[in-house]
């Protein structure tokens, strides 16, 4: 059901269990400031969320959120999701510190949020991605997401977005 393979440059499960290297942890309200600062670095194109949005997302009872932290406790990546009123999961934001990209953090966070959604009864997950963001699209395609539709001028910059979905479980 859940992937057992790992990317060449990501830590092994034994390394992660031993607490060596970056590990995934649940993220909550106390992580607002650090998550917001990282989001500002990840989305410097004007699409970063404001602090109030993170305050809402990280404190809501239907949120499903994880972070990747170093041994020193520094956040290098995060994913924020919500279970919506229709019972579907929505990946609201996935961010990886620019200098830590291409190390498997995004993939590991997506597996974690999918598992978190599944454990809370969610069977369908959706997300939005820029039509110009080929790297993110490749990750989502590799994870089994499918494009459902193109959304004209979805982003505040005027860029189009794709709506993608996946059935989990």
Image (cartoon, rainbow, N blue to C red):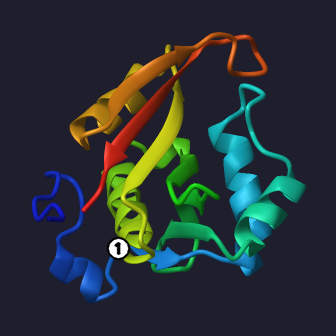
Q: Is residue 104 left or right of residue 50?
A: left
Q: Secondary structure at mark 1?
A: loop
Q: Quadrant of the N terminus?
A: bottom left
> Is the residue 45 above or below the residue 103 in the image?
above
Q: What residue is drawn where x is 76% and y is 74%?
A: 59
Q: Residues within 10 Å of mark 1 (few under 14, many from 20)?
A: some
Q: Is residue 104 rendered to the left or right of residue 89?
A: left
Residue lying farthest front?
Answer: 86
Relative to 61, residue 102 above or below: above
Residue 88's spot in the image, x, y percent? Answer: 50, 55
Determine if residue 161 is in view. yes
Q: Position of residue 154 (x, y in %)?
A: 68, 20
Name the quadrant of the C terminus.
bottom left
Q: Give the x, y percent position of residue 111.
A: 32, 60
User: Which residue occupies 39% across, 38% down?
Assistant: 165
Specify whether 20 is left or right of 11. Answer: right
Residue located farthest toward the left when viewing the structure as drawn? 5
Single out the residue that lies furthest toward the bottom: 18
The one nearer the camera, 49 or 44, is 49
Residue in the image at 78% along x and 21% along y: 156
- Is 26 placed above or below 53 here? below
Nearer to us in this view, 33 or 61: 61
Quadrant location of residue 37?
bottom right
Q: Name the residue located 10 percent from the left edge and 59 percent from the top edge.
A: 5
User: In this rendering, does residue 102 appear at all?
Assistant: no
- Judging by the rendered image, the residue that carries numbered circle 1 is 21
* Residue 22 place in picture, x, y as percent: 39, 70
């Amino acid at each position: 059901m859940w992937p057992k393979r790992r990317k060449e440059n990501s830590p092994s499960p034994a390394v992660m269990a031993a607490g060596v290297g970056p590990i995934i942890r649940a993220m909550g309200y106390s992580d607002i400031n650090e998550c917001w600062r990282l989001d500002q670095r990840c989305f410097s194109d004007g699409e970063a969320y404001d602090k109030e949005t993170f305050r809402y997302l990280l404190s809501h009872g239907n949120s499903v959120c994880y972070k990747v932290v170093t041994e020193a406790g520094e956040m290098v990546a995060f994913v924020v999701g919500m279970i919506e009123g229709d019972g579907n999961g929505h990946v609201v934001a996935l961010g990886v510190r620019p200098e830590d990209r291409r190390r498997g953090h995004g993939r590991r966070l997506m597996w974690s949020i999918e598992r978190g959604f599944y454990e809370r009864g969610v069977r369908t997950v959706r997300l939005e991605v820029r039509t110009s963001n080929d790297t993110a699209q490749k990750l989502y395609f590799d994870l089994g997401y499918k494009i459902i539709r193109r959304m004209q001028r979805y982003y505040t910059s005027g860029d189009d977005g794709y709506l993608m979905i996946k059935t989990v479980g």
